[in-house]
Amino acid sequence: YTQQQISLSMRNASLEQVFAAIKQQTGYYFLYSNDIVKKVGKVNVDVKDASIDKVLKICLAGQPLTYKIIDQTITIKENAPEPPVLKTKSVAADTVITGKVTDQQNNPLPGVSVAAEGTSQGTVTNAEGNFSFRLPSGARAIVFSFMGFTPQRVEIGSNTTLDIKLAENAKSLNEVVVTALGIKRETKALGYSVTELKGSELSQGKEVNVANALSGKVAGIQVSRAASGAGGSSKIVIRGNNSLQGNSQPLYVIDGVPLDNQNIKPASSTGGIDYGDGISNINPEDIETISVLKGPNAAALYGQRGSNGVVLITTKTGRSGKGLGVRFGSDLSVGSALVTPDFQDVYGQGLNGDFTHFRVTDGRIVTMADAKAQGLQGMPKMSAGRDRITRSSWGAKMEGQEYEDQWGNILKMTPQPNTYKDFFNTEKQLINNLSVDGGTDKVNYRFSYSNTHVNGYVPTNTLDRNTFNLRTQANITPKLQLDAKVNYIFQKGQNRPTLSDASDNPAYLFISQPRSMPLSTLAAYTWTAQDIARQFGYSGVAVGQEKTYATNSSTANPYWTINNTRNTDRRDRIIGMLRLSYDFTKWLKLSARGGTDYYTDQRLRYRTIGTYQSQNRNGDMEEQVMRVREDNFDVLLSSNFNLGKDITFGLNAGASHQQRFMRLTGNTGREFIVPKLYVINNTLTNSYLFDLQESEINSVYASGQFGFRNYWFVDLSARNDWSSTLSPKNNSFFYPSVSTSLILTDALDIQSDVLSFLKVRGSWAQAGSSGNPYQLTGSYSLDQFTHGGQPMASFSSTIPDPNLKNELTTSVEFGADVRLLDNRLGLSFTYYNASTKNQILDVPLPPSAKFEFRRINAGEIRNKGIELTLSGTPLKLDNGFTWESSFNLARNRNMVVSLTEGVETFLLGADRGVNVLAQPGKPFGVLVSNGFAWLKDEQGRRLIDPATGLPLRTSGRVQVELGNVMPDWTGGFFNSFRYKGFQLTGLIDIRQGGMLYSQSNREELIFGTTKKTLAGRDGTYVASGVVAAKGTNGEWTGTGQANTKQVKAQDYWNVVANDKESVVSEEMMNDASYVSMREISLGYQLPSSLLAGKFIKRAAIGLYGRNLFYFQRKTDGFSPEAAAFNVNNSSLGLESTSLPMMRNFGVNLNIEF
Amino acid sequence: CTKDFEEMNVPPTSVTDIDAGLLLSKVQKDAAFVEGNERANIEFGSWIQHWAGGQVAPVSRYIQQPTDGVWSAHYTLLRNLGQIRNQSLKGKEDDPTGRTKLAIARIMEISVWQRLTDLFGDIPFSATTEDAGDVNNKPTYDSQKDVYTKLIADLDAAIAKLNATDLSYGNADFYYKGSVDKWKRFGNSLKLRLGLRIRYADAALAEKTVREAMAQPLLASNADNAAVPTFNNAQTTNAHPVLQQFIGGSSDLRYLAAALVNTLKAKKDPRLPLIAEPSVTSKAAGTPDYFGMGVALTDAQLLGLIKDNFSTAAMSTYFNRTLATPIPCYVFTYADVSFFKAEAALAGWGATVADAETFYQDGIKAAMAMLPYNITTVPPAYVTAEFSFAGLTEQQKLEKIMTQKWIMLFGRDYEAFSEWRRTGYPVLTPGANQGSTNGTIPRRAVYSSLEGLLNSTNYKTAVANLTGGDNYTSRVWWDKRP
């Protein structure tokens, strides 16, 4: 295929100029070390319609250089000394040469070109660095070449097995990355920043959800996760939130096919379960690379869904090689709570430092006060608590006193410090991977199977995920190539925990449970006749029902929950892709691709008869089936033209069609008729669930690349979408982008050991979005049930807008990439400024508008910020010891510029004590109290009631701004140390600034369960503040005199938090800053010498720890990065009885046969 | 390639046009049911001491909370009634197919507006959205005086439009099956209620309104009662709201207040066993008896509380899932009207003072005959003790009327709260907890927190017009009695 015709006429040209000219005409890349081409003098070339081979031969005639053409890459290399005369024992043609290529640290190098010198025949190494190829006749040497490494020429001797170590060549850093639409580009030609991670860089410690593995590794990416049990969702936000209504998450594209990453029916602030998102279904072992396109500048060609950025995942393909490559990996890890509430273990159940009730020896129950006053004989008795009065830990010191608990058990009052440890499990996670690959020069294939089993932190919570992946690539004819992939995922979850403010959230018990209550009393989780006879404080309980520790509505017994409530889910997912490409000529190529992401979620949930929370304690159930499908079809025509000797020009044009479909059907039933039969027709009353959504988008797009002398590049793109979700007059929208980059070191011909490389870049881009289906018309919905046969209907609470237009994000980006000190130090800097206008918003209306929302195009949200990545090799010793280090930092400044005329507030989320708002002139995520506030003097000091010694608070709820959710900056610090077969890495993940409102804190303060409530329990608590005086108008003012009056801690904290509805909001605020030791891993690869000739070709073992500890954490009793109950805006800034984040330790083993 | 886009974007689970009757049904049912559900009972129902509330309900302990749900529920009712006028029957104002239906919807709407202003005081009224296409997201607040004046005028206009030969709602009308005659009586009775509600704030307008209403046909028997039927063999949502509280609510919130139980006990009222259940403890001891729980208890009181010593609502009636004849959810009854007439007669407005006693007795008889009591013959002892006005002052007579009305209004929290505030009868002793009110019974509901957030300028203006601010203790315009 080197038939391409080249015409050149150059005199006294440098080799580089000639190469550049050839590149322009052919699109071939040259790989060479700058040193060698400088050894060559000027050349003269004058050819017409000559082949590349011919031109190169002319150029290199008489020079100490040889060339090699593999695929579209031409490698230029110094001539090796003349080979020794061939001996008789040298191998014959047709001999199969096999071997392995590694780097200096013995890491296998996949994708290395292996070719017989002077021919185009060759192969590439597979994922494990192995190769195998048949020597053509006349071959004298084999050349190994790989981008970033010095090519190596090996004479053919008698050995048919060659193990090659390639040396890194820091001089040739023409990296190629995957960009939008899967187009591979040289990074230096890009006018925007793209960060690419290799699959092996993702995580030594296996994250079940691969999105978590990006945390701290890429500047400007903020990863947060819901603490939602095994297989939960993760949230990635790139360069700040820019969507008020959506979740600002990027689009995931796998091998060119968008992945449906929605989290259907996520948990809300009042309960629910996280069934996992789309990205959590992907097997990390299948990933070859991940490219992060940050925002529209890089992702404009993805259209509307590119406006939050795109995470492009390229999966592994098979490598042609000798026979089968078989690889097996196994990973075992255990997890335990990283942060749990800071419990106090001094005071037990009760109130006012004492027991509440008393069992007299004659069996009567009286109040403790009466018992004392009358000097009665008997023992203290607990009462079943309602809020705070009897079930809190404001009681006596735990000193082993004998008492009778609320059920009638006679116990000694002792601290119960290990409630979390006793109830929850050690999380165990086992992942096994098996992959097989192989192929010929015509066909390659790779098959992988992975099995993940997790025994969750919450008892009975399990996750099983099986993924099967088959990918094959074939050259059907020399011009027609096929690439096909089928990925089948089968996932089963069981008893995923309920999240947030819901009684069956297992974490709910522990933050409020009396600190003296032994778990063994709760472990007997059903009422017995004896309990009922001796209980106090309950009403209407029956044998066999759930034995709750309190009587109000938020106190399920977690032992009952894990044993008598069940939720199971099953997801069957197929991600398929078929791509055909045809090379008309060397410069014109057509590819067509169809892809689908199709899954079915089946969810069943039931609570058995006797569950306290269920209607009439008669149990309930819900089952639902969701079918989601997204198909994408696209064609892309790509071409390269030559316009003169210095200018290259490429043009791509394409079209795509996307269709989405979601259908949900299900039933809910309440009150079982017959026990232990969990079907809908066994319920007294039931109702259905139904939803259906369909939408389509058609698109055409084009992009052009212009290059000048290989140091100045300009890219242009344009796309037009037609979306079914907008009206005919608005459903077509256009958005362009332009970007440029200039390699200053090349343009100015700077030759310096200090400044090795300098590139500046800039881009401007737009991306549009058309919102969800069915948003144009207001409509009437029928009530699910008639009333005695009479149907009823109501009008939607949202005022629609039939004239909605598309949203538009405009983004500008500038940056520079610098490499210094002989490439030892790299610095990348980016400034961006993006604004999203015309957001399709359901603006909340005051209820008195009679409608809840008005749907409009409104608002402008601006995100601007900087990203900085510093990477380098501080130490590189001759003995092979290498220390590599990188630091990234991102600072995003978010501003809600405007909403719409007359609208000043957009409600993102709310909890009992706080509203989370977007307001013009302020950053996204303003926390405004929705509870009570302290009365303060002008200097902000609290006013203290002189009579009680307690701080004064407002009589009603007030709205006061308490802070903002957004961090000031985020960053990561990564270090890697390599020596021989060992590699030690560490990742520190940093977030500074931003606030969180904690619902857990509120519960802990109401019930006096944490250390914070210990001080002054004996009546010596002095509330900070100034003594207040009441004026004649009844208003309190400060006297300026510091309060010294002592009160009981209980009385003070009861002013702070009396019950769920009655809290001083500002006391629940937490600073979400952290510096976390995210990951440490140690890997060791057995030296190949040890395995030589063995059945096992390669073996490596690794140890890792994840989420190890915090260098800095300011939250009170929970992990700031895992506090959210879902991945949407509605949980932004809200911690709601979250389960602890896991600290994991693991070991993994990888073997290759 | 975009030709099927429009068809695809049609919502699959809803329609863009609908029969007005389905909207009326929805409004009638929701408006009725919301007045006696658990949410209302632990707030207004415990303030007027029908229900005991409890520790898990801060509002019942006078700890101030915004009343978001009640506020938005009313504007939702008004939205759906507005759709009848602005979409379903638009342009048919003078057409026999729309005229009477629109008038009925307007009368419904006036009853909803009245309830809303009664609970909160000044409200966004005249400036609220009339048409979905032209939403006002910052409606100003009207004074309650203006609201009442306009409601009375609007009601006259609506009644005048009722025409017996026009098309009506038929079965979609839960109250009257479309009977135009009964709607006239309802309209006139509503006018009587509007007039009397403002009697201590604007006596002149009150007297004029009441006199006009008294001259018109009013609800004249229990057959004229406006009520929504309930069904206890169907879905939970079809059951009586008090029964729904039993089925789906909290067991801590099912207890009756001492004031109600003690009043019924003291009067030896035959309705007592049909309203209350003997306490668990008394039944276990073999001496079934009725005990109401205190309201707005302090922490110390709650500490010593033993729930089994107190009465819930009766398991044979309100809490009975298998009750043969389900209890209708009453909206406005002959008993209401009888007590209003008695009060008007005491004032000499449209009737003589001498008529007051008869109207009062009619009210008691009607109230006892209603389900679930079904007491068609009032026990003689009760007649002897309760029926006579002899020797009483006007205030004492009013107290007797209002006390009977208070019993009759069990399950209709909003109306009971308004009537208690308006007249001060029956005299209720607040619970001991100080809450946000210094231990007094709240006099109004606090505006929705969303108003402060999303309509803040107008909200602040409205609050400035309240003596004492947006608090439980501030009073609405017509609340002039001590």
Image (cartoon, coloured by chain):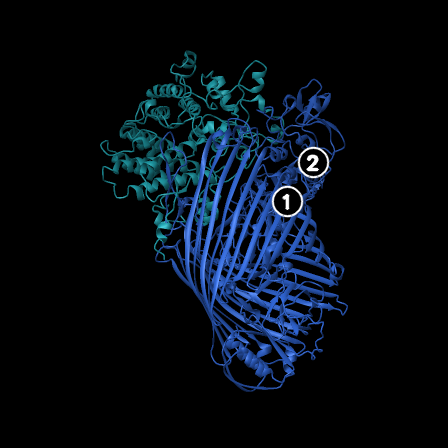
Tell me residue A23's x, y (percent). Answer: 53, 76
Disc 2 residue crowd, few under 14, some 14–19, many 20+, Cα 10 Å: many
Is any atom of residue B26 visible in this view? Answer: yes
Is any atom of residue A962 visible in this view? Answer: no
The quadrant holding residue A18 is: bottom right
Residue toward you, A82 or A174: A82
Tell me whether circle 1 and circle 2 mark residues in contact (CB < 8 Å).
no
Instruction: Report the chain shown in cyan.
Output: B
Instruction: Report the chain shown in blue.
Output: A
Write down the residue under mark 1. Answer: A454
Q: What residue type is labelled 2?
A: Arg
Q: Quadrant of the C terminus of chain A?
A: bottom right
Tell me residue A4's x, y (percent). Answer: 50, 76
- Marks 1 & 2 on one chain: yes
The tally of labels here is 2
Q: In this view, does A206 lie above or below B34?
A: below
Mark 1 vs mark 2, CA separation in Å: 31 Å
Residue toward you, B294 or B309: B309
Tell me residue B84's x, y (percent). Answer: 32, 40
Tell me residue A922's x, y (percent). Answer: 52, 57
Report in which chain the residue with disc 1 lies. Answer: A
Q: Which of marks 1 and 2 is in front?
A: 1
The quadrant holding residue A1011 is: top right
Tag 1, which secondary structure? strand
Q: What residue type is labelled 1?
A: Val
Report in which chain the residue with disc 2 lies. Answer: A
Write down the residue under mark 2. Answer: A515
Q: Is residue A818 above or below residue A1119?
A: below
Residue A1020 marker: none
Disc 1 residue crowd, few under 14, some 14–19, many 20+, Cα 10 Å: many
Q: Indicate which disc, 1 or 2, sits on the residue closer to the N terminus.
A: 1
